[in-house]
Amino acid sequence: MGRSPMKREDRDRVRARILDAAGVVFARDGFERAHIDDIAVEAGVSTGTVYNYFAGKAALMLDLHQQSLDAANADVAGLVAGPGSFDEKLDLYLGNFFRFTGENQAFLAILRDSPHLLQLSPHHAEDQARRIFLLVDRHLGLVADLLRAGIEEGVLAPSDPHVLATVLMGVTRSLVLLGTGAPGADLADPVALVRRLFLDGARAR
């Protein structure tokens, strides 16, 4: 008799274990030096089992990033709906944003320096890119909701919240790309810097 098919809950647990193991191996060895065999050992499964769930390292890295984006969006949604003033929520959002980018530096570095390492089959890449785009678009919408609250509280001047969200995300992403080690860059406190540039502007008064 053949083996009974694995239950959905069991498959989900194995998949989650493989993803957790991939995160450990990527953090330890880096994306280029990481091997599927090492991820399998870390997860306690066979190499073939890893390939049953994921096409390769790129699929694992993209799924890990998607998982992080899901969690980040849930945090922002809770922040928008929760108690507190706009100023308090903005500081919490910015702190969470810079923490998120710090935790996902490996993925962001690959996108910046070696995007070819994340190439997948055209169909898989299109599917992954679509899912990540939708998550990023959802994130922008949540930030717009946060800024809309700032407008309603009178902290921000009346404006299109989605335009403001795009500007805010542009500032924060630029600082991440610039990096804390850039010569002459005052990034010791990126949250305070974004607050100053976004809320107060850079013009001397």
Image (cartoon, helix red, strand yellow):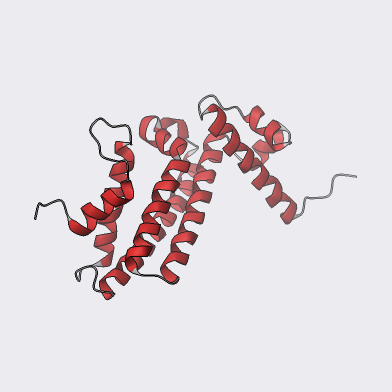
Q: Position of residue 140 (x, y in %)?
A: 35, 59
- Compared with 133, 141 (above or below) is below
* 127 on left or right of 165: right
Asked whether 123 or 64 is in front, the reply is 64
* 108 on left or right of 156: right
Q: Position of residue 188 (x, y in %)?
A: 32, 41
Residue shown at 32%/32% (left/top)? 181
The C terminus: image quadrant: bottom left
Asked whether 170 or 126 is in front, the reply is 170
Residue shown at 65%/47% (left/top)? 16
- Compared with 198, 38 (above or below) is above
Quadrant for residue 109, please give it. top left
Q: Total label count?
A: 0
Q: Position of residue 24 (x, y in %)?
A: 59, 36
Quadrant for residue 163, please give it. bottom left
Residue shown at 55%/27% (left/top)? 29
